[in-house]
Amino acid sequence: MKLLEDKIREEGIILGDGVLKVDRFLNHQIDPALMQALGNEFAHLYKDAGITKILTVETSGIAPAVFAGLALGVPVVFGRKNKSITLLDNLYTTSVYSYTKQVSNEISISKDFLNEDDYVLIIDDFLANGQAVAGLLSICRSAHAEVAGIGIVIEKSFQKGRRWIEETGIRIESLARIASLENNEVVFVSEGEHV
Ligand code: 5GP
């Protein structure tokens, strides 16, 4: 998606170890117009997939997921990282290792909001090694919910997540695919290129 690629080129900051900082529009300050455009694009891509629910993880998946939910007319549920006193039981829980924070978090979703009637679109801000997506897939399996597809805002195609998801056979759509962050330059996967 050109709008997103341009934004990454203009405002993304490359840190060491293959990490891209996008605090100016996605991970800290949020650009609402861009988030709406991302949500609309996910909705367009999955409009015929029969989605009944969008699943994401707090915090940065929520903004694009809400706009996708608005466009598709379905609710959005986010995995919670901290169990509050209002969220103690009746939960699906899984452990997810965070690529950027290098710690494992328990992710929980109430059984009230996911069940075997759901046809789920998983949305997340980044795809690196696929741990966050794997956690959400495992929660969907526990709930006997069907996963119709995965929508990623920024995929780092040089890491393992993409290949792993392709091997599961689940549809994946990434709005920006980064082939490399080497030499302080963002190189995107070009259309038709297989990475
Ligand atoms: P994965 O679970 O696919 O290994 O990593 C995805 C999660 O790690 C995302 O939800 C995101 O929070 C974080 N992440 C991974 N790589 C990056 C990156 O390069 N930049 C930022 N800002 N977050 C990342």
Image: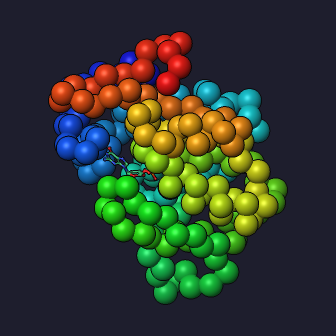
Image spot of residue 189 (x, y percent) = 42, 21
Q: Position of residue 147 (x, y in %)?
A: 71, 47
Residue 31's x, y, as percent?
A: 30, 39
Q: In this view, does 58 lie to the left or right of 162?
A: left
Q: Can residue 112 be seen in this view?
A: yes
Q: Which residue is drawn at 79% across and 61% down?
A: 144
32 over 100 or under it: above or below = above
Count of picture labels: 0
Residue 116 at x, y percent in the picture: 81, 60
Residue 73 can be seen in this image? no
Q: Which residue lies furthest to the right in this view?
A: 117
Q: Residue at x 74, y 65 (%)?
A: 143
Which corner quadrant of the image does residue 134 belong to?
Answer: bottom right
Residue found 36% across the figure and 68% down from its top: 103
Q: Which colour scheme is used?
A: rainbow
Determine which quarter of the picture holds residue 158: top left
Quadrant for the N terminus, please: top left
From the viewer's side, name the closer residue of 177 and 143.
Answer: 177
Q: Nearer the viewer, residue 83 or 52?
A: 83
Depth check: give the residue in front, 13 or 46: 13
Left or right of residue 107, residue 116 in this image: right
Residue occupying the point 76% across, 51% down? 146
Q: In this view, does 129 lie to the left or right of 110?
A: left
